[in-house]
C-alpha cells in the first residue's frame, strides 16, 4: 500500500503530528513494542504544553500540579511560587501521553507498525521491513539519536545521560518539586519531583563519559532536599540532547521534529514544549503542501533557543546554579515565575531590566 506520509518514531513528537493529521494516509513506525516504553522522561511541563495536551487528549493526562519549586543551593533553600494562582508547572503522565496519542492515531485510521525499525533510503525514501517506501513526506521523529539526521545531515549527537528512580518517599509536599546542584556535577541540576502523596521521581543528568555511583547521588539528593526516600519502585533513564537546533527543520521531503531537531529548552532539557509548539504547524505544512508554514514557526522558536543556549553554556562553565539564584532575585522583585516556565528568554530580558535590584537580592 502506498502512504502519503511515513512517520519514523512513535514518541510524543511523531504521535502528536500523526494524531492531528486527519486527511492523510499515514504509517507510523516505532521500534519498540509498546508506545511510551521504555520510559525516560520526568514529565514536567508548563502551562502552554499542559493546555495543548489537555485540549487534545483530555484532563487525565495531567496527574499533578506544582505550586512552586524549591531550589537547594550551597546549603540555602530558595522557594519560588506561582503568583498567578495557576500552577507553576504540571506533571504530564508520560506513558499515558504516548498511549493516548497512539489510540488517537489509530482512531483516525492511520497505521502504526510496532517493533519495527525504519531507516533512510538513499533516494528520499524509507526502508521498513526490507521494503523501500516512497511516501510524499517523511517525518523523522526518531529522537536524540536520529538515524535520519545522522545519515542525511551527518551531525554527531551530543547529549547528557539522564538517570531516574521512582522511590517511595516521606516528608515532602506534593505541590512542590525540588532542584539541587550537587558539587562535582557542574553540567546539570538534579531533581526530586513528587508524583503522588508518597511517591517521588528523583533524577540527575551527566555527560556520558562521567562515572558516578548512582547510590551516592540519589542519597545526596534526598539528604539535601530533606526528603526521606524508601524502596525503589522503578528505574529508568534516557538522553537529553545538547546539539544546536538544526538551521532548517526539513530537507527535501524529510521533516524533523522533537529531539531529532533537537528543540529542547537549553537549561532544563524539556522537549515536550517544542513538540506542542511545533506539531500543529508541521501538520498544517503537510496538509497544505507548504513547508514554509513550518519553517516560519520553527525559526521563531529557534531564535529564542539559540539565545537561551548561549547564556546556558556560559553558566554550564561557571556555575549552573546562577540562573536559579537570579530567578530568586527576580522573584523578590515580584515577577510571576509561572509566566516564564517555557519562556526562559523572558527571564533573560527581565534580568536585564531589573539588574540593579537583582544585584541587591542575588544572595
Ligand atoms: C531523563 C529525562 C528527563 C526528561 N524530562 C523532561 C521533562 O521533565 N519535561 C520535558 O518537557 N521534557 C523532558 N525530557 C525530554 C523529553 O522526554 C523529550 O524531549 C521527548 O521525549 C522527545 O520526544 P521525541 O518523540 O522527539 O523523542 P523520543 O521520546 O525519544 O521518541 C522517539 C521514538 O522513536 C523511536 N525510534 C528511534 N529510531 C527509530 C527507528 N529508526 N525506527 C523506528 N522507531 C525509532 C524510539 O523508540 C522512540 O520511541 C526528558 C528527557 C530525559 C532523558
Image (spheres, grey):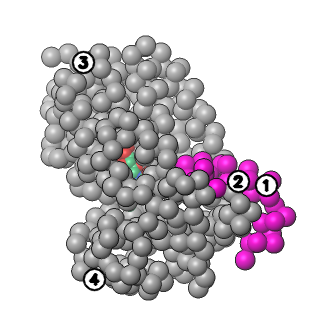
The span from disc 2 to disc 4 (Cα, nearest Å) is 39 Å
- Residue corresponding to mark 2: 348
Question: Does the beta carbon at disc 2 come under 8 Å from ligand 1?
Answer: no
Q: Work out whether residue 194 or residue 181 is closer to the camera in this orientation and state it.
A: 194
At a point 71% along the width and 67% down the height, the residue shown is 332
Q: Are marks 1 and 3 in contact (CB under 8 Å)?
A: no
Q: Position of residue 149 (x, y in %)?
A: 41, 38
Neighbourhood count class around disc 3 (C-alpha, 10 Å): few under 14, some 14–19, many 20 upward: some
Q: Work out whether residue 209 or residue 241 is closer to the camera in this orientation and state it.
A: 241
Decide which of tag 1 and tag 3 comes sooner along the chain. 3
The residue segment tinted magenta is 336-363
Q: Are marks 4 and 1 in contact (CB under 8 Å)?
A: no
- Residue corresponding to mark 4: 230
Question: Does the beta carbon at disc 1 come under 8 Å from ligand 1?
Answer: no
Closer to viewer: mark 1 or mark 3: 1
- Residue corresponding to mark 3: 25
At a point 28% along the width and 17% down the height, the residue shown is 24
Neighbourhood count class around disc 4 (C-alpha, 10 Å): few under 14, some 14–19, many 20 upward: few
The span from disc 1 to disc 3 (Cα, nearest Å) is 49 Å
The span from disc 4 to disc 3 (Cα, nearest Å) is 49 Å
- Residue corresponding to mark 1: 352
Point out the residue furthest to the front here: 85
Decide which of tag 2 and tag 4 comes sooner along the chain. 4
Closer to viewer: mark 3 or mark 2: 2
At a point 43% along the width and 28% down the height, the residue shown is 280
Q: Are marks 1 and 2 in contact (CB under 8 Å)?
A: yes
Amino acid at each position: 500500500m502506498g502512504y502519503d506520509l511515513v512517520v519514523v518514531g512513535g514518541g510524543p513528537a511523531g504521535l502528536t503530528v500523526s494524531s492531528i493529521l486527519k486527511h492523510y494516509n499515514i504509517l507510523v513506525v516505532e521500534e519498540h513494542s509498546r508506545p511510551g516504553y521504555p520510559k525516560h522522561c520526568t514529565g514536567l511541563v508548563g502551562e502552554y504544553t499542559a493546555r495543548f495536551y489537555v485540549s487534545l487528549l483530555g484532563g487525565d493526562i495531567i496527574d499533578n500540579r506544582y505550586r512552586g519549586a524549591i531550589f537547594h543551593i550551597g546549603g540555602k533553600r530558595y522557594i519560588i511560587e506561582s503568583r498567578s494562582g495557576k500552577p507553576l508547572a504540571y506533571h504530564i503522565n508520560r506513558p499515558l501521553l504516548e498511549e493516548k496519542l497512539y489510540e488517537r492515531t489509530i482512531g483516525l485510521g492511520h497505521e502504526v507498525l510496532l517493533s519495527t525499525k525504519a531507516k533512510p533510503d538513499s533516494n528520499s525514501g524509507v526502508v521498513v521491513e526490507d521494503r523501500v517506501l516512497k511516501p510524499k513526506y517523511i517525518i523523522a521523529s526518531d529522537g536524540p539519536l536520529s538515524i535520519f539526521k545522522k545519515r542525511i545531515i551527518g551531525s554527531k549527537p551530543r547529549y547528557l545521560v539522564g538517570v531516574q528512580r521512582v522511590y517511595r518517599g516521606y516528608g515532602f509536599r506534593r505541590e512542590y518539586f525540588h532542584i539541587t546542584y550537587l558539587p562535582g556535577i557542574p553540567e546539570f541540576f538534579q531533581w526530586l519531583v513528587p508524583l503522588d502523596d508518597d511517591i517521588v521521581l528523583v533524577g540527575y543528568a551527566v555527560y556520558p563519559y562521567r562515572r558516578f555511583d548512582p547510590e551516592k547521588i540519589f542519597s545526596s539528593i534526598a539528604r539535601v532536599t530533606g526528603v526521606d526516600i524508601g524502596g525503589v519502585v522503578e528505574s529508568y533513564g534516557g538522553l537529553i540532547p545538547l546539539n544546536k537546533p538544526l538551521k532548517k527543520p526539513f530537507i527535501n521531503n524529510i521533516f524533523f521534529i522533537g529531539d531529532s531537531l533537537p528543540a529542547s529548552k537549553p537549561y532544563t532539557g524539556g522537549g515536550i514544549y517544542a513538540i506542542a509548539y511545533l506539531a500543529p504547524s508541521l501538520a498544517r505544512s503537510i496538509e497544505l503542501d507548504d513547508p514554509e508554514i513550518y519553517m516560519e514557526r520553527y525559526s521563531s522558536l529557534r531564535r529564542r533557543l539559540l539565545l537561551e543556549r548561549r547564556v546556558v553554556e556560559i553558566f554550564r562553565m561557571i556555575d549552573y546554579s546562577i540562573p536559579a539564584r537570579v530567578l530568586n532575585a527576580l522573584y523578590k522583585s515580584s515577577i510571576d515565575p509561572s509566566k516564564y516556565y517555557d519562556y526562559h528568554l523572558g527571564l533573560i530580558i527581565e534580568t536585564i531590566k531589573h539588574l540593579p535590584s537583582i544585584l541587591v537580592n542575588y544572595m
